[in-house]
Amino acid sequence: MDRVLEIISNFIDIKSFSILRLVLAVVILAIFLSLRGVFSSLIIKLFLPKEKKKTNTKNNSFYRPLRLFFMSLGIYLSILTLRPTVMFSSILSKCFRIIIILICTYSIANLVSVGSRFERTLKLKMNKANDSLIKMICKGLKVLVYLVGAVILISELGYNISGLIAGLGIGGVAIALAAQDTASNIIGALMILLDKPFDVGDWIKVGDTEGSVEEFTFRSTRIRESANSIVAIPNSTIVNSSITNWSRLQKRRILMDIVLELDTPLKKIADVQNDILIFLENEPNVITDSAYVKFNEIKDNGYNLKVFCYTPIINYVDYLSYMEKVNFKIMSILNTHKVSMAYNSQTIYLKK
C-alpha cells in the first residue's frame, strides 16, 4: 500500500487529495466526453451561422478535430482538478500543447485540401483557371501547413530551430543534387500550367504515347492509353516533347486517294469525279467550300483521284462512323458507273 501511495505521490499531491476533488474530476471528464459533439457544433455554428443542417456541421473539416480538442481539454482539466505535482503538471501542459499543435495543423490542412470548401471557393474565384492548377495550389498549401506545424512542434519539444536549419543548410547541397530530377519535374509542371497545352480529360499524343489525360501532378502526367493502361510521363519529358492535343481540333480533315484501273474510260473518270464532288458538297457534315476531288496523278497501276474536305465532327468515334458512311457512298458511286479500283500489280513482258 505504501508503495502504491509513493507512486501516486509522484503524480498527484496526496496532501490536497480528497474524494470531492476526485468526484469533481470525474464530473468534468464526463461532461466533456458526453458533450464534445455539442460543443463542436456550437463553435462551428458560431463562425458559420449559415450551416443550419446537422449533417453539414458534422461534415465540416473542423468538426472531428474540435471533438478531439474538447476530449483532450476534459482530460487535462480533470487531471488539474486533482492537483498534480509540479513536475507532472509541466509534462501534462507540454503534452496538451503538443496535442493542440497537432489538432490545429490537421484542421488547417483539411481546410485547404482537395475537395474542401476552400477548393470550391477557389474554383469560383478563378473560373478561368485550370482544375489541375487549383489542385496543385491546394496540395502545395497543405504541404506548407504541415511544414509550419512540424517546425512549431519541434520548437515545442525543446529543439533549437536555428541549429536545425543550419544543419539542413549543410546537407542542402547533397539533397539538391539528389533532387535534381524532382526539381526539373516541378519546373516542368509550372511550365505546363503557364502554357496550358492540355487539360485533364484531353486526348493527347506525347512521343509514342497517346491517350486521355487522367491526372496531372507536380511530378508527372498520367495518360490512359486506348489499351486502358496508365502511362506516367515525367513533366520534364513532356516539356521537352512535342504535344499533339486532339481534343482541341476545330475540324477534322478527310483525305483519301482513289485509284481507278488503267482501262477506265476518261468519261467515266470525269463522271465519278463529278458525282463524288456533288455528294460531298451536299453533305451537311462537310464544311462548305472545303471539298475538292481532283484527277491529280497517273500511277503505274491506275488513275488517281485525290479526295479532300473538312468535317466539323471532332469526336473520334463519331468521325469513324461518318467515314464509314462516306466510304460506302463512294463505293456505291463506283459501282453505279461500273468502275473498279486498281490494285498494285506488275506486268512482265517476255522477249522471245
Image: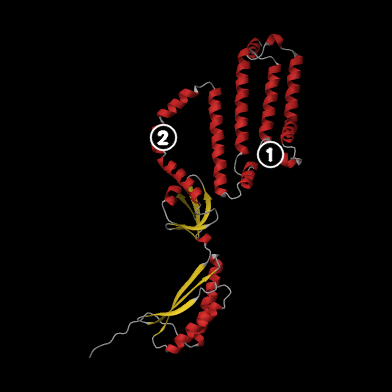
Residue 168 lies in quadrant: top left
Name the outermost residue toward the bottom: 352
User: Which one is earlier in the sequence, the residue at label 2 or at label 1?
Assistant: 1
Compared with 251, 148 (above or below) is above
Judging by the rendered image, the residue that carries numbered circle 2 is 175
Q: How many marks?
A: 2
Q: Nearer the viewer, residue 217 or 17?
A: 217
Q: Nearer the viewer, residue 98 or 136?
A: 136
Judging by the rendered image, the residue that carries numbered circle 1 is 60
Compared with 307, 58 (above or below) is above
Residue 346, horizontal then vertical, whole percent: 33, 82
Quadrant the C terminus occupies: bottom left
Residue 8 lies in quadrant: top right
Compared with 111, 307 (above or below) is below
Query: Is 278 left or right of 103, judged from the image as shown?
Result: left
Name the outermost residue toward the front: 289
In the image, what residue occupies the spot 44% across and 51% down?
A: 238
Label 1, secondary structure: give it.
loop
Residue 91 lies in quadrant: top right
Label 2, secondary structure: give it.
helix
In the image, what residue occupies the spot 44% across and 82% down?
A: 341
Which amino acid does the dot numbered 2 rest on? Ile
Residue 350, horizontal then vertical, whole percent: 26, 88
Quadrant the N terminus occupies: top right
Residue 17, horizontal then vertical, whole percent: 71, 12
Which amino acid does the dot numbered 1 rest on? Asn
Check disc 1: other Cα within 10 Å, few if <14, some if 14-19, many if 20+. some
